[in-house]
Amino acid sequence: MERFQAIERSLITTYRTHIWKKFVEAVNEYELIKDGDKIAVCISGGKDSFLMAKCFQELLRHGKKNFEAVYLVMDPGYNEINRQAIEENSALLNLPITVFESDIFSVVATAEGTPCYLCARMRRGFLYAKAKELGCNKIALGHHFDDVIETILMGILYNGQIQSMMPKLRSDNFEGMELIRPLYHIKERDIINWKNYNDLSFIQCACRFTENCTVCDNGGGGSKRQEMKYLIRSLKKTNPNADISLFKSVYNVNLDTVIGYKKDGERHHFLDEYDKTDIK
């Protein structure tokens, strides 16, 4: 058995419960894939996106959905070592990647303050554009369960709002395009375990400005996200289910107990309807 076949087999044997079933669960629960879809599976070079790509291959072989996948790699200006690592891992994992170039790193190099937000937005725009050029109607990103709960916490603590990283989104700027996140239910520790079990090595941070970092989320605000990781880890010491509760909190919003909320860009306040309700 070739090595890539052993790695694939581990997904449906050793990691069937914590990875493969969670992947299929998210695809089905959020209706992420439909018959006739052509999906650009976006590979950044890290463990998450490579795992996602392998899950898509497995779904194509054994799933019930009739769809196509393109394994898309954008080079925003990687150094030679990172570019080579992505190409070697793609070959090792038997992934037929499509690579295209962009000059994002050069553009954001002149940005004031932290370039992470600008870089993330530009990367997504380039991915949408290339995916659409290739005839795709969706792009898939490798955000996982931990990314979701960290986003919830950051929204509360730094933006003063309750928001979540959605499992799928329609693009505002690219008509007919949609973003999906099929690793939504998969915990980061299980991805790390899969990587270590198969003795795989992926780039941790491809950003040219933070190449020496050991904890980076590739453009999503590494330092704040790492702060959330530490906070959640601390909370779990007294409440082992703190991460699950955070995740469920955005499933169970009770509008009767919310002071205000925003829907379709319009703000609402509980006083808008307060005097219209019957006194019990």
Image: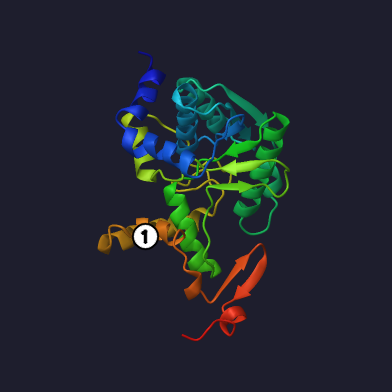
Q: Residue at x 35, y 23 (%)?
A: 9
Q: Is residue 237 above or below residue 6?
A: below
Q: Residues within 10 Å of mark 1 (few under 14, many from 20)?
A: few
Which is more toward the observer, 204 or 251?
Answer: 251
Indicate the position of residue 211 as horizontal and vertical percent values: 52, 43
Q: Position of residue 190 (x, y in %)?
A: 35, 40
Query: Relative to 38, is 144 on the left or the right?
Result: left
Q: Position of residue 225 (x, y in %)?
A: 47, 56
| Lateral position of residue 130 relative to residue 250, left or right | right
Question: Looking at the image, can residue 271 be seen?
Answer: yes
Q: Which residue is mark 1?
A: 245
In the image, what residue type sits under mark 1? Ser
Q: Secondary structure at mark 1?
A: helix
Q: Residue furthest top?
A: 1
Image quarter where the N terminus lies is top left
In this rendering, is residue 199 above or below 159? above
Determine the residue positioned at 63% across, 42% down: 178
